[in-house]
């Protein structure tokens, strides 16, 4: 664990290669020390090596398949890499794991809807968004994430009027939330316009 801590220090200093080397040593010494996999994937992503990060996360989820955060991270990296099948599998697994948990995330539902949309599974995408609206009905941030994804899904379906309507809802929620919105979500909203 000490090498993992040292790797975190190197990560903070943006000394990615040193951090990677340390984390690979930790994994070689103890292949079931899952925190090392998570950090190795994080460092690899920061370095811009999403292919290797994806492989590390796949290895980690094979060893520990019921870690919800790891499944979400795998889905996120797979989606960014264009591997929609792997992203779908990881997001679906996350939703199954967190179904009755307070850690379930509207972002995962929204991301899975975008994956479905990317795979031209439009009814599944809309169904996932409806489920998100129901599951997270009292959470305005979740409503914002869902509205952004809904706009993207409808745009992908060529239904510009519904996409515009969803984006208007997103704008309204964004204004209501003010500074409670994470910068990454604001960026996603801007990209969806």
Image (cartoon, rainbow, N blue to C red):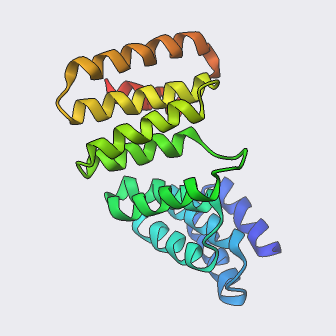
Instruction: Identify which residue is drawn at 36% across, 19% down.
Output: 167
Compare residues 7 and 144 and report the one nearer the observer.
Answer: 144
Q: Left or right: where does residue 31 sit relative to residue 135?
A: right
User: Which residue is farthest right?
Assistant: 2
Q: x and y percent of residue 33 in the render?
A: 73, 78
Q: Is residue 181 above or below residue 51?
A: above
Q: Is residue 3 above or below residue 90?
A: below
Compare residues 59 and 106 and report the one nearer the observer.
Answer: 106
Q: Is residue 98 above or below residue 138?
A: below
User: Which residue is farthest bottom?
Assistant: 29
Instruction: Identify which residue is drawn at 43% across, 36% down.
Output: 129
Instruction: Identify which residue is drawn at 59% across, 74% down.
Output: 60
Where's the C terminus, which quadrant? top left
Instruction: Identify which residue is drawn at 52% across, 56% down.
Output: 46
Compare residues 100 and 59 and report the one nearer the observer.
Answer: 100
Residue 15, visible in the rendered structure: no
Q: x and y percent of residue 161 in the render?
A: 23, 17
Total tally of numbered discs in the picture: 0
Q: x and y percent of residue 125 in the render?
A: 35, 42
Q: Left or right: where does residue 127 sit relative to residue 133?
A: left
């Amino acid at each position: 664990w000490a090498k993992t801590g040292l790797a975190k220090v190197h990560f903070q200093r943006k000394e990615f290669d040193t951090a990677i080397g340390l984390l690979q040593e930790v994994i070689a010494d103890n292949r079931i020390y899952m925190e090392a996999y998570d950090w190795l994937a994080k460092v690899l992503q920061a370095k811009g090596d999403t292919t290797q990060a994806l492989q590390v996360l796949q290895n980690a989820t094979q060893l520990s398949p019921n870690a919800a955060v790891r499944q979400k991270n795998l889905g996120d990296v797979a989606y960014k890499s264009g591997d929609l099948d792997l992203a779908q599998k990881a997001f679906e697994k996350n939703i199954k794991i967190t179904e009755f948990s307070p850690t379930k995330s509207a972002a995962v539902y929204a991301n899975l809807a975008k994956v479905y949309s990317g795979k031209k599974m439009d009814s599944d995408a809309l169904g996932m968004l409806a489920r998100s609206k129901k599951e997270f009905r009292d959470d305005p941030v979740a409503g914002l994430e869902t509205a952004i994804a809904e706009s993207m899904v409808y745009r992908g379906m060529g239904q510009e009027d519904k996409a515009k309507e969803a984006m208007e809802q997103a704008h309204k929620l964004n204004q209501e939330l003010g500074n409670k919105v994470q910068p990454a979500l604001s960026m996603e909203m801007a990209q969806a316009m």
